[in-house]
Every structure is written in C-alpha cells, then in structure tokens.
Amino acid sequence: MSWRLYIAALAGLGFCVWAGSAVVGAAEETEQKPYTIKDGKVDQHTYNGWRRYTESCLRCHGPDGSGSSYAPDLTQSLKSMSEDQFKETVVNGRTNVSASADNVMPPFGTVEDVMDYLDDIYAYLKARSDGVLGRGRPQRFEQK
Amino acid sequence: MKPRGYLLVAAAIAMPLSGALANDDLMKMEKDPNQWVMPTGNYANERYSTLKQITAQNVHELRPVWTFSTGVLRGHEGAPLVIGDMMYLATPFPNNVFALDLKHGGRIAWKYEPRQDPTVIPVMCCDTVNRGVAYGDGKIFLHQADNALVALDAKTGKEVWKVMVADAKKGATGTGAPQIVKDKVLVGVSGGEFGVQGFMAAYDIKDGKLAWKAYSEGPDDQLLFDASTTSMGKPVGKDSSLKTWQGDQWKIGGGTTWGWISYDPQLNLIYYGSGNPSTWNPVQRPGDNKWSMTIFARNPDTGVAKWVYQMTPHDEWDYDGINEMILADIPVKGKETKALVHFDRNGFGYTLNRATGELLVAQKYDPKVNWATHVDMATGRPQVVKEYSTGAGGEDHNSQNICPAALGSKDEQPAAFSPMTKLFYVPTNHVCMDYEPFKVSYTAGQPYVGATLSMFPPKGDNNLGNFIAWDAGTGKIVWSDPEPFSVWSGALATAGGVVFYGTLEGYLKAVDEKTGKELYRFKTPSGIIGNVMTYVHDGKQYIAVLSGVGGWAGIGMAAGLTKDTDGLGAVGAYKSLSDYTQLGGVLTVFALP
C-alpha cells in the first residue's frame, strides 16, 4: 500500500534533517567518539540525547537504555551494532513477531523529535554502552 | 441451570436476550459468590467475596492445586472470570481468549485467537497488557489492543459481532476491560502518551451499534454535558472544557479512560476516571485542561454527565485519574454515606458523596506525598508546593524529589473493600521522581510526552511499595505493610478475614484483615501484576491469580529504578527485579487440602 512508500519517503527526509544537524560535536578532541565526557560530565549533545531518549525510547527500552521486560538492553546492543545499523533501525523500525516473540519497534523516520536529535541519542547511548557514563540524569560541563 | 440454558438457546438463534434481561441476570450473578462474573468482582468494584471456607486460621494450609500457562510472555494484568463451570481469561497481545472447563480439570473448551496488525504493539504505552474480558447476555466481550471490541459466544467462542472503537494509527489502543451495564457494553480508550482525545463509549450488547460516546474534553455536545451537570455542587456552565485549553489543543488533549468502570443501579450512574492531559510538558498546555484527571458520574442510558470532579487541574506530573471508583456505604465523619472512594495516582485518597459529587475527604494515603500540602475542601483544588511544580520550574528545569512518581502512589491495580471491616485494602507504589519538562511536537501515532523522569524510593526508605488498610471515613492509614517493590496486583478481601494480593517478585500473599500480619505466601512462576479472585467449584473455594511480570512495572525490571549516580535513599539493599523473576504468563489456582 501507499502508506509504506509514504513512510519510506519521509524517512529519507528525516535523514536529511539529521544530516543537516550533525555538524556540531566534540569529535575533534575525542576522535570518532560521538560524545565528550570530562570528569564524569557530558557535553550538551549527549545530555540532550538522554532527554530525547527518555521522550521517545524509554517506555520500551527502559531507564538509561538498560532494557525492559519487552525490549533489548541498548547498552549491550550498541557493543555490536554499528552507528549506521543503529540509525537504520531507528528510521525504519524492526519487527520480530513469532510464536514466542511479539517485539515491534516502530519506524521513527517521520518523527521530528527523534530524527532531529538522532546523533544526540546515539551519542548518549554509545556513552552508556562504552561504560563511560552511569545511569540517571547526566551532568553537563560548561561549554563555550 | 435455567438461565444458562436460555442463554444457550438465545445464542444459537443469534437473537440474544433483551437488554433489561441481560442486566437482571448480571445483577443476580454478581451476588453469587461462587462465580466471579465481572472484571471488578461486582458493580461496586468492591473486590470482596462472602466466601469463607478459607479463613485466617486455616489459610496457612493453602497450596496450589492446578496451573495453566497462557503461552504469552508479556505483562498479565486483570483476572479470569468464572461463569458457572467455565473460566474465561484473556492474554496480553495477541489477546488470545481461553474458555477453561472447570468440570474437566481446566481443559480448554475453546480458544479465540484474534488476528491483529502487530504495528499496534509499539503504540501501547507501557507493555501490551489487557485487563480482562467481560460477560453478559451469553457473550464474552474482548477489548483488543487494536481497538476492536469483539463479542464472542460464551459457549463456542464464535464471533457474534465486532466493532472498531478507535484508531491505532492515531495512537489509540485498547487495554481496559469492558463493563456490561444494562443493555450496553462500556469501553474506554488508552493512549494518553500519544495525544488521543479520551472518551467512554457504549455499544448495544446485541449488535455492537454505538449508543453514545462521551469525550473527556471538547465542546459540550462531545462531552455530553448539559445544564444539569455539576462540579463541587455547582453547574459547570457552558464550554466548561473549551475554556480551559489554549486554542484547539483539546483535540489532542489526552484524558484517556483505561481504568475500571463501576455502576450504582439505584442511582443509575456509572463512574470512571480520565487520565493525564497530553503532553506531559505542562508549559505547552496552559489552563486547567478540563476534564482530564476527572471522576465522571454519567447516566448509562444516555451518557449525560450528572457530576464531575477534577482532582489534578493542569497536571504537571502525569497523575492519571483513571484508578477505580469503589462504591461503598460507610460512615463518613460519623454519618452513614453512599460514598465513592478513589485512590488517585496523585497520592490522595478521595471520599465523595456518589449521588451528588460532594467532596467529603481528601487525605494522603502515603505519608511521603509532597507535591501538594492538602486539598482545599471548598474549591476541591490541591495546594501545589511550588518547589515541586514542574510548570513553575519551566521547560528544561529539573524538578527534584517529587513524591509520588509519575506512576502514582497507586496505578490501575485495584484496591478491595470489605463491608465487614469497612476498610479499604490498597496496593501502593512508594516511589518518587525527578521530572524535567521540555518542548515536543505532535505527530499522529507517535509519543507525545515531553518530560524526562528518574524514579527512586523516597528519601530514607528502601521499599518501593506498601500494602495498606485505609479508613475512608476519616482518611487515615490503619496499618501498612512495607514491600520491597511496588505492589502492582489487585487485592481481594474475603469474609474469611483474609486479604490477598500479589507482589512483583511473584508471591501470592495472604494477610490478616485486621492487622496486616502475613499468614501465607507462595512464589508463583513470575511477578504478579494481575488481580486476585476467588470462586467455588464443586463446593470448594479456590483462589486464583495470573502471574506474568510486565507493564509499567516491567520497564524498570532489567536494571531496577534506582540511580547509581547519587545516594538517594538507602538503595544499597535494593536489587533489581530481574534477580527475582522472569517473564511468563501462568494462572495459579489455590485451595485448601
């Protein structure tokens, strides 16, 4: 049905949006790390990633990305999942329905509050997965 | 048995009983303690049984006598029904319904497996729960996740009719149990986290034709309010809802209706509550946001509201008002009263006159509740403490140590009332939170939340729940049993002097109705978020409960709700729930030897 095409088209749009907003970051000083952490405090993007994660992902993936009774622990998932795979999954969703599983992740390709901050969400979860950021609300360091 | 035979004939010719008769049937059946004929136990939502084979003296001899695996892993809320020799139960998504023949050891008499589009799964806020089926007019009524309301022939499981209540593409889902009142099937809607405009709907029990639909917010003709509709004893006047929203925000205003429904046949009124206004960010929706967070008393024939009472105007914490309304005739401040008692998510236990909606008592049923000092009895409004006002703090400000947390001092897990002790037995959450609202945009069918939460036990405590006895006439806790986790199971009070509830670790517990002293415990296969029920078969009393951890409670399961970044509470002793239990839906049935 045309609904699927519509999603796909908008998903493309979503990608443009995040690509556009992906220029900022702390990549210079930490090379390839999407986050910056100083004395246990995080940069604004990683902090915002925590907020947006809480908005759109927590209800299934649990507090601090640590999973729930019905969705995987993302701090584990991101140990093996690449950034591209992660983003592809968020944009298009995932369905695993069988006799023993009823797991469906919706496509977020059309959702502004996710697409606009996808880099931030990834940065936050990657920091959690790398074991450099603990649970709960991250503290921010001052940025200039 | 005569009425049952008649039902069979009626079903066979696909021309069921007249509405009045169906209701008369249920009015008799709800008084028969051998059966458990509605999700709420009876119309008053008492969850009390006059059965007394199992007593405070012999309950320690209780033991499981048979079990049944539902084959579904997600959170199992609600409870089975027992109608005559049949037990009926529904599972979480995919919402399979089983009819178990009690005469043949619980053999499956029939099974109904709906086909639903799995894209509904992630639209369900907090797990794919279902709070059970209803019975009436020889039919079993299932409210599916995808918003289908299905009438099944109770004898065969064959579909009699099916209607769509709401649209999952817009974020609406079905989780609540239907209730049968007169010739109508009443059903609400879930989706307060998706900007759904909440409503209660009534369908004709014979053919599923929509009789009325009453929204929680909007113009008067959508609310089904008229000149006689009152709040706090005064007419609400014209446009009582519209005046409290900015622009047409009411169209995505929440106020969903996923809780339990009670009914007073003498007053001819049904009672239920509405949930949070959408979004969770209060800055984005100025005004009182009526009639979210409201108790509704409506005429079941027309849907017209007789009275309303808004508990949390302009919600800033997600304190949904959907918890059950228990109808009890009790002394209130020394005067015999037809009362409605409601334990709200916001931590206040309310006692109202259920005929008039007059507010009689509003007291905290968890002493740690701090977001408001008290409820002003003249206006009915809570006196909000500025420090805990997430709206006053504003967007991007983290308000800390608010009690209770968003899941409330109690969620949907229903309390029980014993007409013998006149006490209410309440499963509670003992959890606080930090809450930071921020700006969000609305997309149909997507989360519309706009706040971050961190949850933890109140300062100085390490228990996340309590099971309490409450005097609703005075608004006082009589006794309180601490529990390591939130008590997320519906309670059952019995004439045997024993009160039952389940715990998240999976224990079925029996306690003394007068003291709360534990008399019995048994660890079922998984955490309990279902409601305890009782029935008689072949002259013997049984206790039954669904286990199968999940729901909101399951969200914190993998790692627990506590933060390791700070030292709030004595959290050292607190371990995550996954150390105690795993998923899996199982019915466990208990009896004396």
Image (spheres, coloured by chain):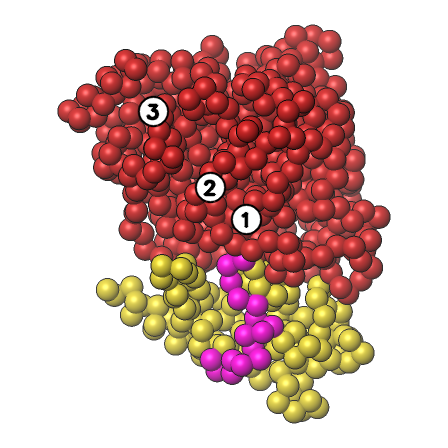
Q: Amino acid at mark 3?
A: Gly
Left or right: B105, with B349 as reference point:
left
Residue at 29 percent of width and 36 percent of height:
B109
Pinpoint residue A86: horizontal percent, then vertical percent: 50, 77
Other residues around mark 1 within 10 Å, as few (<14) / some (14–19) / many (≥20): many
Q: Are marks 2 and 3 on the same chain?
A: yes
Q: Is residue B549 magenta?
A: no
Q: Is residue B443 above or below residue B349?
A: below
Counting residues from the start of the chain, the first of labels 1 and 3 encountered is 3
Left or right: B290, with B186 as reference point:
right
What residue sits right under mark 1 in the picture? B525
Q: Amino acid at mark 1?
A: Pro
Q: Which color was chain B given?
A: red
Tell me the element at label 1. Answer: loop
What residue sits right under mark 3 in the picture? B136
Quadrant in which the N terminus of chain B appears: top left
Q: CA distance from mark 1 to mark 3?
A: 32 Å
Q: Is residue A38 above or below residue B582?
A: below
- Mark toward the viewer: 1 or 3: 1
Tell me the element at label 3. Answer: strand
Counting residues from the start of the chain, the first of labels 2 and 1 encountered is 2
Q: Which residues are magenta?
A: A69-85
Residue B268 visible, this angle: no
Q: Chain of mark 2?
A: B
Q: Which one of the lettered chains is coloured yellow? A: A
What residue sits right under mark 2 in the picture? B67
